[in-house]
Image (cartoon, grey):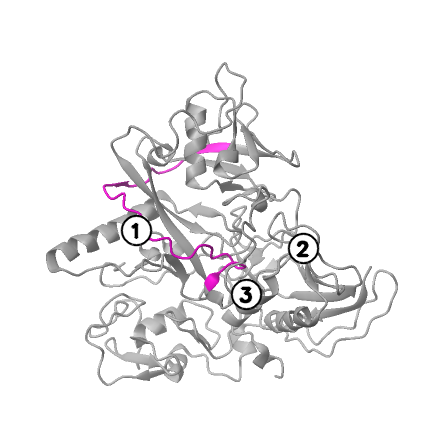
Amino acid sequence: MAAAQGAGSSSAGLAGPPASAPGHSSSSTVVAVWEWQDEFGRWRPYRGNVCSYIEQVIQAYQQKGRRSGSGQVSSIPLGHADPALAPYVIDIPSLTQFRQDTGTMRAVRRHVFPGDSAAGQGIVWEWQNDEGGWSPYEMNVCVFLEQAHATNHQRVDLRSLGYNYEVDFVAQVQTNKTTRFRRSVQRRLDAPYPVTTSTALLHTGMGCSCQQCWPNNGTGPITTRYRHSMTNSPNSSTTHQVPGRTASVSSSNVGFVPYNKPTLTGARSTPRLSAQNTVVLAQTGSLSAALAASNGVSAQALPVKMSKPSRVSQALAATSTEPESVVKKYLEELKGAPADEDCMICMEKLSSPSGYSDSCQSSTIRPEAVGRLRNCQHSFHMLCMLAMYSNGNKDGSLQCPSCKTIYGEKTGTQPKGKMEISTFPQSLPGHKDCGTIRIVYHISRGIQGPEHPNPGMPYTARGFPRYCYLPDNEKGRKVLELLKVAWKRRLIFTVGTSSTTGESNTVVWNEIHHKTEMDSNLSGHGYPDPNYLDNVLAELAAQGVTEDCLGQ
């Protein structure tokens, strides 16, 4: 990777945009950059080849529309641009990225930049995260940094872009102006972004789809105006760069996929688109004996029984998980397919055979068979649902790609470990009327099982034990009970690729947001956060973990 080299004779720092501000170049060409918003509220650009594919699909549909008077693109499966992104679809009308196997949704956006900007040249600026990997700045920051670097500035102040940082090109470091914490930065060459003739802005879709702010989860966005910002300004990445936090969230869904799942290939057409009361929950058998607290106070065992680690098929031995059986259990085959309706999975008309008929074979499901999910009533090619199910966890459950309704009991691929729970009297900010619940997750390195991306290969477990906190009030205790269910169902962690380091075959967070700090919300991982409990309840519900599970 090419590191940034400081140059120039001036020692003065740049306090605002360079003479030619980002997006105001004299270049006659422009390039399109698509970005998605991670769970910290940070915008992350897709790679240039993925953006090129998205633009090509939209352009093809625009051309089709000019010829036929229709042809507006609805959704774009990203697996056709990058096999690692096979579970992901961008829904253009709502500007959201939807992950088909988990139902996770993230906001996406499209920006255009001059052809001679960093985006047009394929230049990406990155900062070094806590785990030693490199994370990209959002593209408008990359453009700003590259212009400053090209005009021989020695340092720049990012406050004009809403960030509480200075970047020193000579020392190749970023400095937090409040804490003076420093991080390395680097400049890297990648594929240029696609040239476009369309500078029209698409509507903005969801304002923030991070796991706490996701407005479609039933709780609405966080009301604190700039929750992600140390400087109370929008789009600050200060909140995402936490000095020395080994328990910081590095969720699997930040880096698109927790692991490279087998690609759904073979579609026939181009897509359209001090502690007290410590207890331990162990996945190594029944609930282990309660541990003594660090201050010597003994604790009682919690009457919860946890399942043994096993293959998913063994864990659900009482339920048939044969792919055809699962599909037929939850879908009712229709006698006649809707003439003008598309299958959301393969993007073919439901009146045509499944787009996966060449790659997914079944002796009991015909390529032209169309089924309707029994509860939500959404229709798909049954063979497409079979392909999607076979490409996932194969745990006996299905999730509707359209509305995310879960059929059956969803389980995950979390490695074995233990979950410790304790309480202490100190209050969390924003919850001064109660004490605190502390959860400690322990997972050790091991060998991947058949449900993991690379069976038989080792996996690492960085940053464990991981400490998380809840208020010890009625709602906090409710969240705790549901987290126990999620732990039992192996939904809290998975084996995949770290979004911060890029390391594969490692244990990462999986879809359910946790607070890993007590008394600071500078990172978005602490308190106060008035909407967190409601939001995490919605996240749990999205995984099929609701109050109905507590009596089981």
* Magenta-colored span: 186-215
Q: Residue furthest left?
A: 67
Name the residue: 49% across, 34% down.
160
Coordinates of residue 302 in the picture (x, y in percent): 75, 76
Judge left or right: residue 382 versus residue 141.
left
Give me the C-alpha separation between circle 1 and circle 2: 38 Å
Coordinates of residue 23 in the picture (x, y in percent): 35, 35
Query: Which numbered mark, 1 or 2, is in the foreground of this view?
Result: 1
Give me the C-alpha separation between circle 3 and circle 2: 20 Å
Give residue 54's mark.
Answer: 1
Marks 1 & 2, CB-CB < 8 Å contact: no
Query: Which numbered mark, 3 or 1, is in the foreground of this view?
Result: 1
Q: Is residue 162 visible?
A: yes
Q: Which residue is mark 2?
A: 464
Q: Earlier in the sequence, mark 3 or mark 2?
A: 3
**Is 187 inside the magenta-drawn segment?**
yes
Residue type marked 3: Gly
Q: Total marks drawn? A: 3
Q: Earlier in the sequence, mark 3 or mark 1?
A: 1
Name the residue: 78% across, 59% down.
426
Q: Earlier in the sequence, mark 1 or mark 2?
A: 1
User: In this picture, is 370 found above or below 31?
Assistant: below
Name the residue: 51% across, 59% down.
221
Give residue 155's mark.
Answer: none
Residue type marked 1: Ile
Neighbourhood count class around disc 1 (C-alpha, 10 Å): few under 14, some 14–19, many 20 upward: many
